[in-house]
Amino acid sequence: MLLGLAGRFGIDYILPPAKRLGPVPTTKEIYKEYIDVAWPATMQGLLLQLMTAINLAMVGALGADALAAVGIMSQPLMVMLVFVRSAAIAITAIVARRKGEEDYETMNSVLKQGVLLTVLFYVPLLCICFYLLNPILTFAGAQASYIDEAVAYGQFIIIGLFFSALGVMLGAALIGVGNTKAIFKANAIGNVLNVVMSFTLIYGLGPIPALGIKGAGIATMTSYTLIFFLLLYAIHAKDSHLSWHRGSWKFNREILQGIYYIGGSSLGEQAFERFGMFAYTKMVASLGVVALATHHICMNLIDIFYYFAMGLSYSGASYTGQSLGKKRPDLAEAYGKIGVRIALIISVIGFVLYFGLRNVVFDIFTQDRLVWQLGADIMILMAFASFPQALQLVYSGVLKGAGDNFYVMKYSLFVIAIFRPIITYLLCFTWGFGLYGAWIALLIDQSMRTAFSGWRFRSGVWQHIKI
């Protein structure tokens, strides 16, 4: 039985010889290729999660107002980054496709014009946000007791955001050519610098004065800038075919149309996701302090698993685009199926850890017995949710790598922005399940996204999209 199951993971089962359009790597080689792109992206996310937690702990030592001042900036920051992240998805798909086609001139033109678009869009946007930061944060819900601190911190973040946006664009091109290691190294160095500078500037050290929350802002701004320059250097990495000496800075209508078509759909998807998450979190918050505290801990725990699945999604997007560029839809589908198999293995591990260690985990996070009991129960639902979460990220990664973002946007509109808020309200309030209802809704949401994206993957429509 085990031998039969293992056989389903082999390349001969995934892509039978009769369906091959050319040579294929061995089972060992193709899994290694996939994981080599996935693991740096995963480690980057996990490192960011760890560094964020450390920074929050340092800021938290300054008091509740300082913590609130940093926290209130997070939502405006996410909104500002939506645009470049949407364009970045388009850059990844187009760069991967052009690399597969070995059209390196156009590939570098896509990168250059993406960078130029980012500069033209973000310079005026960030200037406006810098000067209107006080009313922006007030609208976001900042209180009078910490609004001045929030503005002082936020101004440094906005300056750094210019370099962060450019870094996102460079990272998108590197993902497209499969060089996620460079992104991981740049972010690792930048985030470690952030922690060291935060400690030094927040509390002071020797002749360096204690700057409090301003110190945290300066440290973050500096790390954003350093990461950008490290990624700028990585563009010239050996064998990636990315180079500032190739391609054109002059806007090309065909390239802009590709960025607009894919990026516009990605913008819609992210807008629907932001709306859905806002409505979802607002309903959870109305359940009370115990429910909200429990939910916050559980969401941070599931984020750890999320980064493993996101690494697989990046790898799938990169290899899908490159394979389709080589006119090898058979290989593109094979990489997708390999991602699904790795996702299932990771999901089994996640299920065992979440289910088996749920009591131990909450002993670490809280001494409140109500939060402990509720959290241990919620982690059972979290364990089951690990399967559809991983699968839908892998499937959607393939679709995005193929440029099928409009389909992803359509099911995101229905599932995240419409269905999820409705089913959450019904389960939490109408049917009285409370926080259990919110997590049942999350499980249903992830399962529906898996069904929609999985059906599209199996249909093969994405293999014929031209970008």
Image: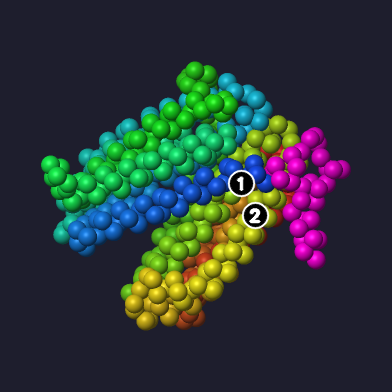
Give whichever of discs 2 and 1 has the lower sequence position: 1
What residue is drawn where x is 41% and y is 54%? 49
Residue count near mark 1 (Cα–Cα under 10 Å), binned few <14, some 14–19, many ≥20: some
Q: Amino acid at mark 2?
A: Ile
Range covered by the magenta-colored residues: 1-30
Q: Is residue 171 left or right of residue 465?
A: left
Q: Can you name the residue that lies furthest to the right here?
A: 18
Q: Quadrant of the C terminus?
A: top right
Q: Is residue 436 left or right of residue 54?
A: right
Above or below for 53 versus 315: below
Q: Quadrant of the N terminus?
A: bottom right
> What residue is pinned by disc 1?
35
Dot 1 falls on a residue whose secondary structure is helix
Q: Is residue 348 left or right of residue 194?
A: right
> What residue is pinned by disc 2?
342
Q: Is residue 4 left or right of residue 351?
A: right
- Determine if the magenta segment contains residue 5: yes
Say which mark, if any, is on residue 154.
Answer: none
Q: Position of residue 194 (x, y in %)?
A: 31, 45
What residue is drawn where x is 69% and y is 50%? 338
Q: Which of 215 and 254 lies nearest the eye of the viewer?
A: 215
Q: Which of 395 and 226 lies nearest the eye of the viewer?
A: 226
What residue is drawn where x is 21% and y is 63%? 64
Do the residues under discs 2 and 1 have CB atoms within 8 angstroms? yes
Q: Position of residue 297 (x, y in %)?
A: 40, 67
- Determine if the magenta segment contains residue 2: yes
Above or below for 343 versus 319: below
Residue 84 lies in what quarter of the image? top left
Residue count near mark 2 (Cα–Cα under 10 Å), binned few <14, some 14–19, many ≥20: some
What residue is drawn where x is 49% and y is 78%? 377
**Colour option used:** rainbow
